[in-house]
Structures are given as structure tokens and as C-alpha cells.
Image: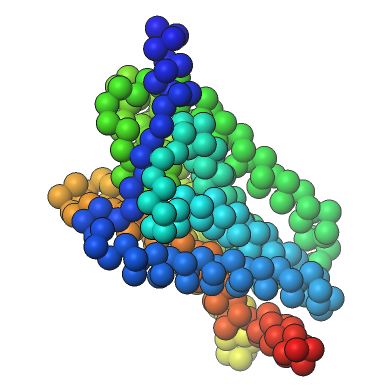
């Protein structure tokens, strides 16, 4: 039995899929995805660069934004090679161990993104409810500890999932239905009992994105309560305006996640390309949109980005 499991797990090769049903448009789809990856990588790199190089951005809010940009970079790089490899070179094969590695990093950065969004919600709550103690509550040490906790949380949650996947046997089709390794997708190909894997995956989702979303909503309820107690309409508007970027980031993360969950649960009759496109949007939309949202809606980031771009243009 152990020999059989070695053959069917460690030595197995999966076949990734582009966009099923839209093979004739793969060239154009690859151009779109390439543009999105360039936007995500350049946008998040620029955000990181301006936060590091501009002293006026060395504040808790922007430290958390740098964590979000780092997470988005990691998420983009995790899928870049396989996704563009399929569309450009029809390179569909991926070994079991490489598949597990990609799955680990995709899920790690997804959990980290959810955790960072929660930390940013807490940051906004402290800044609005107790502005005089803002910098004393969120010290550099405290922010570093939060960052370490975010990485540790994501790693600890993902390791049991991967260990259980290593124990599965695969004796059916080896064709995956996405252009990257997706945990439910890999489980469906197993010919052994995956109920424990499914339960653990659902538990991980509930204890990360599920719990985080509840605390984010709670944070905003407290923020709204605090803001409504402010007498001046102008001050209320100013307080709400500091949350717009974060609300946008939360929306572009959770809406595709919820859409993907609904499609997998209730969209069994939907064309295959619908599942694939939503799954790709789930991973690509946050890294692409977050730099745009923060550059447009956050005055300090917008000014810093324009300053760096003007400085670069002047040197050319």
C-alpha cells in the first residue's frame, strides 16, 4: 500500500487547465492576464517603495499598507509562472510536490491578506476612537509583533492541510480545472476518503476569512458609533474618509471569495469557464486593485507616488 501511495502522490504529475471552453481565445486572455500581472507587480512594488523611502509615511497605517502590498506581491508571484506558462507555452504539467508548494503559498498569502485587512480595521478603529493614543498603542514593536503573528497564523493553519493531502492516493483523472493548484480541485481527483481533508479545509476557511470578516464588521460598527458621536459634520466626513480605501480593499478581497464559494456550491450547471474566471479573479483582483484604490483614495499615498514618478521622470 505504501508503494502504491508513493507512486500516486509523490511521483504523480497533474495537468493544469487554462480557461475550458475558451481555448480559441487563450492568446487574448494571456494578453489580459499579462497586463493584470504587470499592473499588480508594478503597483504593489511602487507602494512599497514610496512607504520605505518617504519618512512622512512611516506611520502605523502605512506599515499595515506595506504588509498588504507585500502579501499581494506574494499572491501574484505564486500563480504567475503556471498561469502564464499555460497560455504562452501550453506548459500544463506540474508535479505533485510543486503543486503542494504552490497551494501552500497561495493559501498562506490568502490567509495573510485576510489577517492584514483585520489588522488595518483595528488600526482605523484606534485612530478614530482614540487618536491621542494612536501612536502609543500601535508602536513599531507592536506592529512587528502583529506582522509575525500574521505569518505564524497562516503557516500553522496550512501545514496540517498539506500533510493530509500527502496521504491521499490519486488513481482517477489527473486533470485539474484551474490554472493553479486549488485545494478543493486537488481533493476531487483523489480515490480515497477526503472527508477529513474537506472538514479541515472548511475549518481553516471559517477560522480565518470567516472570523476575520466578523471582527472587521464589528470594528466598523464601533467606528460608525464613534463617528456618529462627533458633533461636527465636517469632522464626521473627515473620519469616514480615512476608511474608504480600507473598505474598498475589503470589498475586492471578500466579494470574489464569496462569489467563488457560491459558484462551487451552487453553480454546478454553470459553464466550466465561469468557475475558472471567478477563481482567477479571486486571486488577481486584490493585487491589481489595492494599489489603485490606495493611490486614488489616500491623499498621502497619491502625493508620494506622484513625487516619486516626477523625480524618476526628471532623472531620465
Q: Position of residue 219 (x, y in %)?
A: 57, 61
| Point 34% across, 24% down: residue | 170
Quadrant in which residue 42 is drawn: bottom right
Split into 4 quadrants, where in the image is the N terminus? Answer: top left
Q: Looking at the picture, does residue 114 appear above or below residue 95?
A: below
Q: Looking at the picture, does residue 206 appear above or below residue 140?
A: above
Q: Position of residue 127 (x, y in %)?
A: 70, 70
Quadrant in which residue 292 is drawn: bottom right
Q: Position of residue 118 (x, y in %)?
A: 59, 57
Q: Decide if residue 303 is on the left or right side of residue 38.
A: right
| Point 54% across, 58% down: residue | 76
| Point 62% across, 85% down: residue | 238
Q: Decide if residue 170 is on the left or right side of residue 104.
A: left
Q: Looking at the picture, does residue 23 appear above or below residue 132?
A: above
Q: Nearer the viewer, residue 92 or 300?
A: 92
Is residue 4 at least partly visible in the picture? yes
Q: Residue furthest left?
A: 269
| Point 46% across, 62% down: residue | 284
Count of residue discs: 0
Q: Residue furthest top?
A: 1
Amino acid at each position: 500500500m505504501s508503494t502504491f501511495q508513493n507512486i500516486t502522490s509523490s511521483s504523480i504529475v497533474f495537468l493544469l487547465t487554462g480557461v475550458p471552453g475558451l481555448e480559441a481565445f487563450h492568446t487574448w486572455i494571456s494578453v489580459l492576464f499579462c497586463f493584470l500581472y504587470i499592473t499588480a507587480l508594478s503597483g504593489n512594488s511602487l507602494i512599497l517603495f514610496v512607504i520605505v523611502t518617504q519618512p512622512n509615511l512611516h506611520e502605523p497605517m502605512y506599515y499595515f499598507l506595506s504588509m498588504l502590498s507585500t502579501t499581494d506581491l506574494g499572491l501574484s508571484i505564486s500563480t504567475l509562472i503556471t498561469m502564464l506558462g499555460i497560455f504562452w507555452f501550453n506548459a500544463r504539467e506540474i508535479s505533485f510536490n510543486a503543486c503542494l508548494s504552490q497551494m501552500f503559498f497561495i493559501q498562506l498569502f490568502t490567509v495573510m491578506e485576510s489577517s492584514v485587512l483585520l489588522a488595518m480595521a483595528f488600526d482605523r478603529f484606534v485612530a478614530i476612537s482614540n487618536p491621542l493614543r494612536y501612536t502609543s498603542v500601535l508602536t513599531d514593536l507592536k506592529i512587528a509583533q502583529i506582522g509575525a503573528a500574521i505569518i505564524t497564523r497562516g503557516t500553522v493553519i496550512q501545514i496540517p492541510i498539506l500533510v493530509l493531502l500527502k496521504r491521499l492516493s490519486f488513481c482517477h483523472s489527473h486533470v485539474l480545472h484551474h490554472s493553479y493548484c486549488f485545494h478543493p480541485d486537488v481533493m476531487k481527483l483523489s480515490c480515497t476518503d477526503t472527508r477529513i481533508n474537506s472538514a479541515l479545509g472548511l475549518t481553516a476557511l471559517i477560522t480565518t476569512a470567516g472570523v476575520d470578516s466578523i471582527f472587521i464588521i464589528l470594528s466598523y460598527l464601533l467606528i460608525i458609533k464613534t463617528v456618529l458621536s462627533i458633533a461636527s459634520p465636517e469632522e464626521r466626513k473627515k473620519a469616514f474618509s480615512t476608511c474608504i480605501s480600507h473598505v474598498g480593499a475589503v470589498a475586492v478581497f471578500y466579494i470574489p471569495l464569496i462569489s467563488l464559494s457560491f459558484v462551487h456550491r451552487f453553480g454546478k450547471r454553470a459553464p466550466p469557464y465561469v468557475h475558472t474566471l471567478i477563481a482567477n479573479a479571486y486571486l488577481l483582483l486584490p493585487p491589481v486593485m489595492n494599489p489603485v484604490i490606495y493611490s486614488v483614495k489616500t491623499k498621502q499615498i497619491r502625493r508620494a507616488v506622484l513625487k516619486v514618478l516626477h523625480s524618476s521622470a526628471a532623472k531620465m
